[in-house]
Image: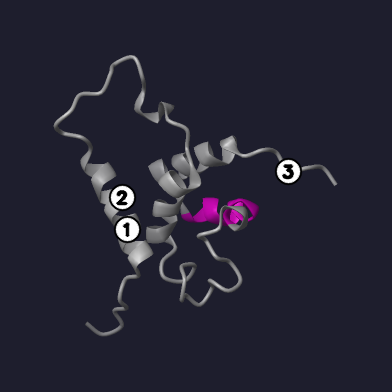
Amino acid sequence: MHGVRPVSRQAFLGILVLAVGALGDTCATRPTSVPPTAAPATFEATVRPILAVKCAPCHNPGGKMYGRLPFDQPSVVSSHADGVRRRLQGEDLQAFERWLATLAPAPLS
């Protein structure tokens, strides 16, 4: 296992959240009148788990980029949205975009 680094607790939790989300809720049925994307996207519940997987280990605590761009801080992630967009695709990108849409617009300078 040359070059394998241990996974931080935060990264592990992010992976776990994504795995549970991918499996879905096989025991319960969802109401048909509410689409699954109706819940508001929050940073901790929606974006942070994606970044914990996609941007690990560099932007997580202890990573080489964490000092300059800590991706556990919503303000840093939103201020670097274009760079994050380039690294995401599919449902991850859509979830990121939904979260960005919930943020207040930046004040004009």
Q: CA distance from mark 2 to mark 3?
A: 30 Å
Magenta stretch, residue numbers = 77-87
Question: What numbered label is drawn on residue 106?
Answer: 3
On screen, 74 above or below 31?
A: below
Report x, y in % for residue 70.
55, 65
- Residue 91 occupies quadrant: top left
Magenta segment includes 81: yes
Residue at x-position 70% and y-position 38% = 105
Report x, y in % for residue 13.
32, 58
Identify the residue position indicated by label 1 in the image.
Answer: 13
Magenta segment includes 29: no
Between 95 and 107, which is closer to the camera in this rendering? 107
Identify the residue position indicated by label 2 in the image.
Answer: 17
- Residue 26 occupies quadrant: top left
On screen, 109 above or below 2?
A: above
Residue at x-position 51% and y-position 37% = 98
In this rendering, would 66 be left or right of 17?
A: right
In this rendering, would 98 be left or right of 24?
A: right
On screen, 107 above or below 49?
A: above
